[in-house]
Image (spheres, rainbow, N blue to C red):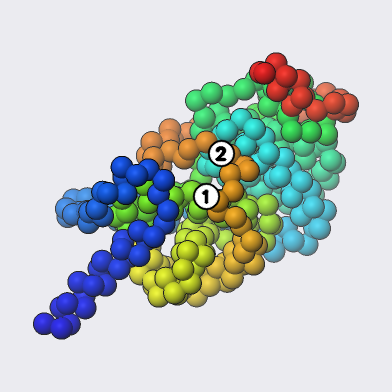
Amino acid sequence: MSHHYQEQQEEQKIPFLLDSLYCEEDILTEVSVETESFSSHDLLWEEEELTSLFSKETEYKISYNVLEKNQSFISARRESVEWILKTTAYYSFSAQTAFLAVNYFDRFLLFSFNQSLNHKPWMNQLVAVTCLSLAAKVEETDVPLLLDLQVEESRFVFESKTIQRMEMLVLSTLKWKMNPVTPFSFLDFITRRLGLKYCLSLEFLRRCEKVLLYTITDGRFIGYLPSAMASATMLHVLDRLKPCIGEKYQYQLLGILGIVKDKVEECYRLVQEVACNIDFDSSKRKFGTLPGSPTGVMDVSFSSDYSNDSWSVATSVTSSQEPLSKKIRGSRE
């Protein structure tokens, strides 16, 4: 009898303790946490979904060991990723859009370094603009013109035709695989399984999103799989909420994904190092809302023949004398 009572308590701990996440909507605070009853069909569908995510995430794994040998890449990457994040925030794109753009950027540059191609500063900027443009087309419903996309103190401004040519080059280099698994795919899955009420789910995802956006600029995270990033991020958020929760329930959270702790521990320590000073109450950087589920995002899968001749891209570059963001903001006001 005592053993059965303890099991019931364990089943209720996670939703109960996560109630301490702050929810501003008073009307929703009165809604009790309802434990979702999953039918055998639902559980089977979710297990198949998880298996598919695990299988797909390994297709896009990038080795950091290859990239860390080139310090110029690490420096150029940080500058480009920061520009992507600023522009994403400027247009209120979703955090998923930012992650897709950075994923394209890393995969493309990895191929470039494997081909021993030297990237000049204007080239890195062109690739960043191109990758964000492609990510916005995949994820967003309202995409700005290519010239308008070059805001937030862009060092160089490129003509639309130059970016369009570069888009074709990036697409062919990435073999038109533009919908990789990201940490948000796993966050959505885990949040559903936790059975949180609506307002708590939003707050939990908001905090996880903020941590991920802080870590994405650090090149050391390149080699970690999205599942490890998602797990480490959630553990950090719980640990910041209340240290005993993160330590006490890390096995339950990892159990949802079936991940061994050792595979996440290193990533978790790195997340703690990078994101230790995040202010969760700050809304300095605003991003659009995430899609409700990965199935709600159009799966973009193209097919195209790859040609080495596509590397010859005619460029038209001008140095930016004045940030376009000032002109665009002025026209909006």
Amino acid on which disc 1 is placed: Glu
Three-letter amino acid code of the residue under disc 2: Phe
Q: Which of marks 1 and 2 is nearer the N terminus?
A: 1
Tag of residue 287 = 2
Task: Tell how many labels.
Answer: 2
Other residues around mark 2 within 10 Å, as few (<14) / some (14–19) / many (≥20): many
Q: For the residue carrying disc 1, how many other residues have a C-alpha within 10 Å: few (<14), some (14-19), or many (20+)?
A: many
Question: Residue 112 location, x and y as percent?
Answer: 74, 46
Name the residue furthest left: 1
Image coords of residue 202 (percent x, y):
41, 47
Q: Is residue 85 left or right of residue 4?
A: right
> Which residue is painted at 62% across and 22% down in the image?
144
198 left or right, relative to 262 = left
Residue at (38% x, 66% y) in the render: 253
C-alpha span from label 1 to label 2: 10 Å
* Residue that mark 1 sits on: 209
Does residue 161 appear left or right of residue 93 in this picture? right
Q: Report x, y in % for residue 33.
A: 26, 55
- C-beta proximity under 8 Å, tags 1 and 2: yes
**Residue 249 vertical placement versus 134 (above, below):** below
